[in-house]
Image: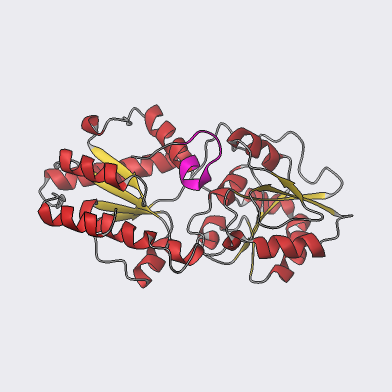
Amino acid sequence: MFEFRPGPYGGANQFLKALRDALARAGAYTDDPAMADVVLFNSHHRLADVFRARRAFPGKIFIHRVDGPMSLYNDPADKRDGKVIAANRLMADATVFQSRWSRDENRRLGWPPSGPESTIGNAPDPALFNRARPSPPLSGGKVRLIATSWSDNSNKGFDVYRYLDAALDFSRFGMVFVGNSPVRFRNIEHVPPLSSAGLAARLKESDVFISGSRNDPCSNSLIEALHCGLPVIARNDGGHPEILGRGGELFEAPEEVPALIDEVCGNYGAYVERIALPSISEIGESYLEFAKRLMDEQSAGRLVIRRPGIFQSLAFRLWGI
């Protein structure tokens, strides 16, 4: 259950559209909870609708896809983590975390014991985000760098992009930032948010992707770049290391980035060959396998299904969900 938005609208929107399409291709998707065996709901979105569906269909399995902790990458006072925990306790029969980092950090910050869980990453639409590039990499004279972010949150890496805007040798490099930015760049080209097709085209015109975000559990922008065959230089933080693998290099401080760009470009082909991420079809299959396992557990009487009653309704209102 999710309110899909047309055009660019954040990582959850883009991934869940791709997942919906992959499940539909597999003949395993419906928009109608009454027709579903398993209902997937996302983080803190549409929780009132989820609760009504939970009450209307008490025998169905509800899986909660979570990320965060949002208080780490947004604001320590962000109350959405509390709502997500409450929703998980009141409505979820099982949980999907998007990365091991997200799972571990949520637990460190007090995620309570819950039911069955799985860690399943993200993937983009393969019709758009793929390695079909219009020109060979490193063929444009200057090395073409790119960074993207729908959000203008300062934790999305703007300290890194501000540093590169001042420190890079722009006779050797060109750089574009696509998305919303609180920084006014002097040398980096700033392009407003693009459609998925437009963003994929800009990625394929680039050579190296830069990601400076902090506490990002499963960066969609990072995943989109890797699926387009771009080596990545990413901050050693959040879910970046487990997503990146050997398809790029990690940094601790912005000052390390220029040397890492040279290192990646000096052995470019090897970095490209080492990019290894699951496709959206494989991600969809992981969701299906998890759902089927839960259904088997339910049939065997080993899965406890949440059945909201008066206490849950009161708790729901108390949390302001």
Q: Quadrant of residue 28?
A: top left
Q: Quadrant of the N terminus?
A: top left
Determine whether, in the image, residue 1 is placed left or right of residue 270: left
Q: Nearer the viewer, residue 89 or 114?
A: 89
Residue 106 part of the magenta segment: no
Residue found at x 47% / y 36%? 5
- Who is closer to the viewer here, 10 or 202? 10
Which residue is painted at 60% across and 62% down in the image? 154
Residue 202 vs residue 80, the one in the foreground = 80
Give the image location of residue 73, x and y in percent.
50, 63
Q: Nearer the viewer, residue 210 or 55?
A: 55
Q: Residue at x 17, y 56 (%)?
A: 314
Q: Is residue 148 visible?
A: yes
| Residue shown at 53% from the left, 49% from the top | 220
Whether residue 266 is situated above or below residue 291 in the rendered picture: below
Vertical arrangement, residue 240 with respect to residue 135, above or below: below
Label count reads: 0
Where does residue 120 sit, x and y in percent of width and height? 40, 51
Is 166 left or right of 306, judged from the image as shown?
right
Q: Is residue 57 visible?
A: no
Magenta segment includes 10: yes
Q: Position of residue 288 (x, y in %)?
A: 32, 40
For the magenta stretch, what is the residue range? 5-14
Q: Is residue 212 left or right of residue 315?
A: right
Query: Residue 133 location, x and y as percent?
Result: 70, 36
Q: How is the image coloured?
A: secondary structure
**Which residue ends up furthest to the right in the rendered image?**
171
